[in-house]
Image (cartoon, coloured by chain):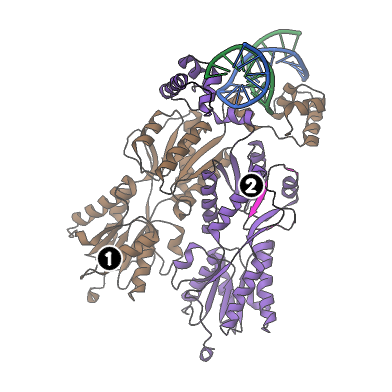
Chain colours: A brown, B purple, C green, D blue
Amino acid sequence: MQVKITDVAKHAGVSVTTVSRVLNGERYVKDDLKSKVNRAIQELGYAPSQIARSLVRKKTNLIGVIVPDLTSSFYSTILSSIEDRASANGYSLLVCNISENIDKELKYLNVFQEMRVEGIIIMHEKMNEDIRSFIHKIKIPVIFSSVKPLEQDFVSVIIDDYIASYEATRYLIELGHETIGFIGGDMRDITSGQNRYSGYRNAMEDNDKRVMDEYIRFGDYKVKSGYEQMKELLSIERRPTAVFAVSDDMAIGAMNCIRDRNLRVPEDISVMGFDGSLFTELVRPTLTSMEQPIQQMGTVTMDVLLKQISGIEIPTTDVVLEHRLVVRESCQRLNKDHV
Amino acid sequence: MQVKITDVAKHAGVSVTTVSRVLNGERYVKDDLKSKVNRAIQELGYAPSQIARSLVRKKTNLIGVIVPDLTSSFYSTILSSIEDRASANGYSLLVCNISENIDKELKYLNVFQEMRVEGIIIMHEKMNEDIRSFIHKIKIPVIFSSVKPLEQDFVSVIIDDYIASYEATRYLIELGHETIGFIGGDMRDITSGQNRYSGYRNAMEDNDKRVMDEYIRFGDYKVKSGYEQMKELLSIERRPTAVFAVSDDMAIGAMNCIRDRNLRVPEDISVMGFDGSLFTELVRPTLTSMEQPIQQMGTVTMDVLLKQISGIEIPTTDVVLEHRLVVRESCQRLNKDHV
DNA sequence: CTGAAAGCGCTTACAG
DNA sequence: CTGAAAGCGCTTACAG
């Protein structure tokens, strides 16, 4: 029922080879034939089948992307800039939202393979043995964005989460804070769980601050868990004067919790976030945050992947982007009188 | 280089037909052959090519989605539930983020057609003649989600924006407000521009409230424009005691503007939003909003489209979902003393 | 229950 | 400059 190339050829009175040639902008087609063909295409409303074309060219112009959570501002911003670079280069995105569901990830990785995508982008680091071995076996270029799995042979586009977290903590220390609460992520995550935790811990120790277990909590990066964990921190007898949450969402949850207890940010408690999401400017007080270059992260990810695909360059090491502390209103110098 | 079905057949010592049969779970294959084939698949790491399969079956299991702005919480939430339903039904999503770029939309519509997607979802209503005629001509099922273009022959999954807006305004009137500012959307948009504006206007008139031009502003649905337009409303000599913004994002921008002027929400000015985004619960005070059933909207969109694709049912009318006023903290009864 | 052959809609050497 | 033919990797009647 769909118009196909033979219909166009018949309609124009030429061979399919000729139609194919004008379709692909080849030279060596006389102008009168070319215009006959173009008219036929027009009249028949012909759109060549990419899938037939892919089969013979062995090129699909498809990229598969695995996103942990589409509704997250962080990931959807990265995805948006990935999409931008992809479409600018003639690629389309096959998007999979796994929402913490590992089975879905493996299933989709299989779909990607069967669809013969030319590259795969993963923004997720909770691996299992199946996924690990799948990625090792597959011949399609795979790149991780914003996360870094343990294995050295996977390529990531990331920031240095350890140093970023270290510097965020040091900033609070420099403001005079002694007791700094920490709301970490999932310790099964290398990047955003373990590395950010170590950064906090080492910054504290290097500056002779006591690291106390009751000041250390862990959430799931979302607003709600920031709220819950902050509730715990506020129940401590000598509550912290500053809190560092490893995601802006959790930091906002923490701020809301503080406010709901009739305490003020930053007068009573300073709050520091991490990521640089859109929300930092949207809440009041605005949120001081250790920011990742989110947009750039997407762009660079796509550019590196494109190079891998074209075979120009096989990256062997991670691409590490610059983090940046953006000071806004939610942190202030410790008011000694207040404690 | 990729392993193909002939390799598997050779390795297992059977015909490609047989391999194809076990791949597709057909009966009529003896157990010993079946296990031979399965072993060969295993050993060779064979993954059948969907694109070859699509060519012969004339079925791609692909859905094309056009999103106006991936970074918007509203659209990414719909997209997320669309993805959920799609993958549950064996479909993958080809996602295009057009970011207000009409040319990109037409280009992507073409890509969708060439990729032979089985259905197209559009969450965007800024049409031009090319797009309109393209959609009319194409034989692929198209469905609009959360928006309703002018033409009657396109199917949409929406709420009744006019009534929702009418009721939101009436709620503010019932709280005793006389002067109600309005921050509308783009008047080129039927759904979220014109209909919501008419709802506001008619609710005002039906309740004998004066509709004054200076109280009516228009933004682009984003936080920043809500802030800017609120600034204008605050500069009016007799400023409104309540403001209704037709997106939660703009409402939040308005709240921030009010706060930055050292006024309080809702004591000095009540603020009402629209959409039911995640932010409503995230800001302080929490935002009263006329909510759309965002998740359901995605689910229903996909379900209706799936029916269209399977030919079970060709919807001829829009699917209208229920809106719901969710009262939170940002609106209060007008305090007469205050004015 | 199994296999040889045609065909899906294109592109690309190969001849002319 | 143009076309006939082979082939991309599968599935599906058709025979047996």
In terms of image quadrants, where is residue A314? top left
Q: Residues within 10 Å of mark 2 (few under 14, many from 20)?
A: some
Q: Which residue is mark 2?
A: B307
- Measured along the vertical axis of the image, is residue A173 above or below residue B174? above
Q: Are marks 2 and 1 on the same chain?
A: no
- Secondary structure, mark 2, is helix
Q: Please, what is the three-letter code of the amino acid marked with disc 1?
A: Glu
Q: Residue A154: image x %, image y %?
A: 37, 35
Q: Which residue is mark 1?
A: A232
Q: Chain of mark 1?
A: A
- Measured along the vertical axis of the image, is residue B61 above or below residue A231? above
Q: Residue at x 51, y 69 (%)?
A: B252
Magenta highlight on residue A32: no
Q: Residue at x 62, y 58 (%)?
A: B146
Horizontal relation, residue A143 to residue B146: left or right = left
- Measured along the vertical axis of the image, is residue B141 above or below residue B283? above
Magenta highlight on residue B139: yes
Residue B294 in view in this figure: yes
Q: Residue B211: image x %, image y %?
A: 68, 80
Residue A326 in view in this figure: no
In magenta, the rendered stretch is: B137-152
Q: Residue A21: image x %, image y %?
A: 71, 25
Q: Residue A30: image x %, image y %?
A: 79, 23
Q: Residues within 10 Å of mark 1 (few under 14, many from 20)?
A: some
